[in-house]
Every structure is written in structure tokens, then in C-alpha cells.
Image (spheres, helix red, strand yellow):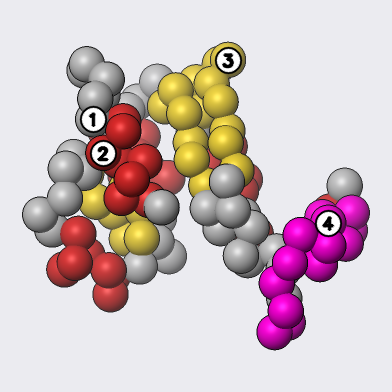
């Protein structure tokens, strides 16, 4: 899903894409059209601030969980935080809409 989003984003003029993933995925993504690839787990918010000192327009998050605040704090005023996945919120063997909804109510 992330690769499809990158390809779609690259159809927009003057877009800079900052990707954040685990170090193990960096090799597979080295030839992707991502402009800046940062390692999750490090202090990536400070690295993003070096690239975009005023913040970013959009954060796309497929994980949720503890990383939400980091991404949200990187937004410019009126920026958009888009959560399109929640694999870090739902636990257990069965991941379904209902188990996700049950988990989300805990965080509200």
C-alpha cells in the first residue's frame, strides 16, 4: 500500500516524499521514488524537521499506535493526518473491523 501511495503522490508537482520505515526495509526501497528515507525508531521527527523546518502538509500513517503523536506533531497548521491502517492498535490473531473498533474505543 505504501508504494502505491508514493507513486500516486509523485504525480503531483513539487512533492517531497519522506518515508519512514524499519532499517530492514531500506534495501528494498532504495530504488523507490522516495526522496528521503528515514529509519523508524531513531529520532526521525528531528530529521524530518531538518528537511521541512515549517512542518509537513500531510502525514499518512498505516500503523497507528505510539507513532501517532510523532506524526501529528510534524504537521503544519491546517495539515492533514490520514490514518489508513491500524495494525499496531489491534492485537491478537484475528484482525477484523470489529476487533479494530473495539480497540479504538479504548483510545477515545
Left or right of 47 in this view: 67: right
Numbered disc in front, either 3 or 4: 4
Please give the label number shown on residue 10: 1
Left or right of 91 in this view: 26: left
Numbered disc in front, either 1 or 3: 1
- For residue 93: magenta? yes
The answer to whether residue 44 shows anywhere in this view is: no
What is the secondary structure assignment of the residue under circle 2?
A: helix
Q: Which residue is mark 2?
A: 7
- CA neighbours of label 2 inside 10 A, class few (<14), some (14 to 19), many (20+): few
Q: CA distance from mark 1 to mark 3?
A: 22 Å
Q: CA distance from mark 3 to mark 2?
A: 24 Å
Of the pair 97 and 104, the residue shown nearer to us: 97
Q: CA distance from mark 4 to mark 2?
A: 30 Å
- CA neighbours of label 3 inside 10 A, class few (<14), some (14 to 19), many (20+): few
Extreme residue in the left direction: 31
The answer to whether residue 32 shows anywhere in this view is: yes
Please give the label number shown on residue 78: 3
Of the pair 97 and 16, the residue shown nearer to us: 97
N-terminal of the pair, mark 4 or mark 2, is 2
The part of the image, by quadrant, that contains residue 22 is bottom left
- CA neighbours of label 1 inside 10 A, class few (<14), some (14 to 19), many (20+): some
Numbered disc in front, either 3 or 2: 2
Amino acid at each position: 500500500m505504501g508504494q502505491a501511495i508514493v507513486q500516486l503522490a509523485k504525480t503531483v508537482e513539487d512533492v517531497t516524499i519522506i518515508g519512514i520505515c524499519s532499517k530492514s526495509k531500506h534495501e528494498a526501497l532504495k530504488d523507490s521514488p522516495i526522496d528521503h528515507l528515514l529509519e523508524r525508531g531513531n529520532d526521525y521527527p528531528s530529521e524530518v524537521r531538518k528537511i521541512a523546518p515549517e512542518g509537513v502538509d500531510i502525514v499518512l500513517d498505516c500503523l497507528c499506535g505510539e507513532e501517532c503523536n510523532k506524526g501529528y506533531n510534524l504537521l503544519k497548521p491546517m495539515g492533514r493526518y490520514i490514518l489508513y491502517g491500524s495494525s499496531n492498535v489491534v492485537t491478537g490473531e484475528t484482525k477484523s473491523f470489529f476487533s479494530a473498533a473495539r480497540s479504538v474505543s479504548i483510545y477515545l
